[in-house]
Image (spheres, rainbow, N blue to C red):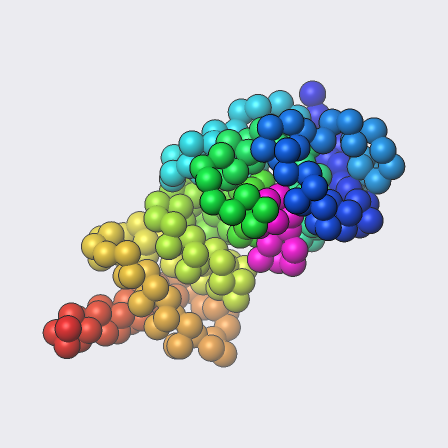
């Protein structure tokens, strides 16, 4: 059953951020259920709803298939979500500390490393990059949002192309100037599906995106046809392949 998404107060987010070390046992083994009854833990949105059962369906195993499944669950299941609300740290921090803590723990906190740093990175959501790229749940919604811009008629296909390699997400989704220009990201995703060169080595998409960024400044993609955008990106691809070949010869 759907219910309003909830946010933390700013003061509660600040308190949690200042007390990560003090709360490590809660992150690693227990939870914040007793704290939820306090003030500032359950500010309901008037915009978006979700079914809390989604939290139990998230797959913490990692890898492209799990990321695609989780992104579909979150993007489709958060009714009424908007990009503006999806930039709200208080929303994602609430979800990662309450409803989705078991998922966050299994996905990001159970594999060793610097736990306080991992908590700060994946349980909070400072700024656009924190919401979009680092927060354990926020990144899933943003995956779906960018995929919906790239492939409006086939969300799963868009996700499969964007998430097939971690570095594709890094160089496409995590570049705000690219990812939020719908005609351009649609063209990039079309090319990802058609061009096998991107699968030949990890740095291929980085070299390509460097050419896209160098040669796309000032271009009004919204005024171009798909054919014109595809031709522009094909030129960027040829230049990227040339640069790559030169680097191999020089090595």
x, y percent for residue 248: 15, 70
Majority SS type along the magenta span = helix
Residue at left offset 42%, top offset 64%: 225
x, y percent for residue 179: 50, 59
Count the marks: 0
Residue 181 visible in the displayed image: no
Position of 161 compared to 153: left or right? Answer: left
Residue at left offset 34%, top offset 64%: 206
Above/below status of 132 relative to 56: below
**Image quadrant assignment for residue 123:** top right
Above/below status of 31 relative to 130: above
Position of 45 compared to 74: left or right? Answer: right
Residue at left offset 40%, top offset 77%: 214
Residue 26 visible in the displayed image: yes
Q: Which residues are magenta?
A: 119-130
**Image quadrant assignment for residue 94:** top right
x, y percent for residue 202: 28, 56
Specify the quadrant that holds the N terminus: top right
Depth check: give the residue in front, 237 or 52.
Answer: 52
Position of 8 compared to 179: left or right? Answer: right
Position of 165 compared to 41: left or right? Answer: left
Specify the quadrant that holds the C terminus: bottom left
Residue at left offset 46%, top offset 40%: 112
x, y percent for residue 81: 67, 42
């Amino acid at each position: 059953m759907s219910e309003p998404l909830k946010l933390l107060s700013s003061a509660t987010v600040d308190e949690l951020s200042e007390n990560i070390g003090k709360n490590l046992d809660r992150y690693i083994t227990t939870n914040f259920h007793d704290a939820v009854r306090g003030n500032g833990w359950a500010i309901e949105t008037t915009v978006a709803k979700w079914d809390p059962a989604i939290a139990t369906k998230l797959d913490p195993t990692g890898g492209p298939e799990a990321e695609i499944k989780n992104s579909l669950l979150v993007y489709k299941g958060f009714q009424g979500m908007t990009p503006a609300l999806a930039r709200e740290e208080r929303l994602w921090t609430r979800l990662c500390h309450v409803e989705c803590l078991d998922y966050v723990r299994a996905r990001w906190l159970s594999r060793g490393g610097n736990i306080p740093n991992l908590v700060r990175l994946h349980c909070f959501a400072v700024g656009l990059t924190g919401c979009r790229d680092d927060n354990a749940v926020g990144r899933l919604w943003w995956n779906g949002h960018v995929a919906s811009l790239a492939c409006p008629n086939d969300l799963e296909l868009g996700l499969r192309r964007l998430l097939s390699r971690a570095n594709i997400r890094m160089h496409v989704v995590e570049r705000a100037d690219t990812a939020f220009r719908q005609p351009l990201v649609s063209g990039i995703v079309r090319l990802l599906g058609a061009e096998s060169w991107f699968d030949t080595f990890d740095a291929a998409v980085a070299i390509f995106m460097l050419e896209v960024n160098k040669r796309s400044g000032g271009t009004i993609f919204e005024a171009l046809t798909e054919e014109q955008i595809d031709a522009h990106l094909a030129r960027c691809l040829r230049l990227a392949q040339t640069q790559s070949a030169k680097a191999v010869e020089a090595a």
